[in-house]
Image (cartoon, grey):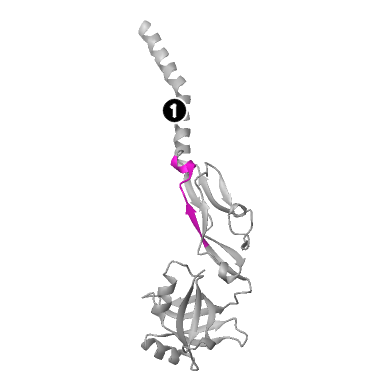
Amino acid sequence: MDQAVLKGQVRTQTGKEAAKRLRRQRLIPAVVYGGESGPMAVTINPLEMMKLLGSGAGENVLITLALDGTDEQSKTVIVKDVQRDPVRGGPLHADFLEVSMKRKIKVQVPLRLVGEAVGVKLKGGLLEPQLREVAIECLPGAIPSHIEVDISQLDLGHSIHVRELTVPGDIKILDDPARPVVTVLIQRVAAEGAAAAEGEKSAEPEVVGKKETKEVKEGK
């Protein structure tokens, strides 16, 4: 996985008033967790951070947080949480997790469906995704941006389960192996239509009976 660079500064002032002053300067407060010396308060540029997250690498992108522009203060981190403005949607605060490239970590990775299910394409089924992401454990450098799920052979009434996901051997999926990821359902409308057709067929003998009665009357 490629590693992006984000510049920041260590901050000594904390609290609501300090945070407001930073935001007026178009900066936001952040905290780095997981370090040997405990949580570290820092300041970052929110626009630069969001640019990194929107680069296509997903939220688990590895970031070299260069504090005060010195290599000695650089830390390898991933974004754990971003608090946003409820109206404008812009970031207000960020939490980072410092990671070691030699120690495995647990993260959530999104699933990406690939192909068109045969049960949908040829048989009118309804595709129902049941899992959007899975928890994995691996080294930081092996974190994938997503896990592809090939659904092209998925037929009516069939499912793909967590145990069937394909990942490299150095990645461990932590979710229940029996948990369904995606299913092709038989559409209820089609089933109801078939039931209605059967009902019409069963009513045909009554029509024949009425016709026979009419013919008898005409004979008289």
Residue, x 46% and y 43% (percent of image)? Answer: 120
Residue under pointer 1: 200
Quick check: 43 above or below 166? Answer: below
Q: Is residue 116 magenta?
A: yes
Q: Residue at x 48, y 84 (%)?
A: 66
Q: Nearer the viewer, residue 191 or 127?
A: 127
Residue at the image position 39 percent from the left and 78 percent from the top: 47
Residue in the picture at 45% in, 89% down = 16
- SS under mark 1: helix
Rendered image quadrant of residue 55: bottom left
Magenta-tinted stretch? 110-121
Q: Is residue 220 visible?
A: no
Q: Position of residue 181 (x, y in %)?
A: 55, 54
Q: Is residue 144 above or below residue 185?
A: below
214 or 39, which lies in front? 39
Rendering coords of residue 61 (x, y %): 50, 71
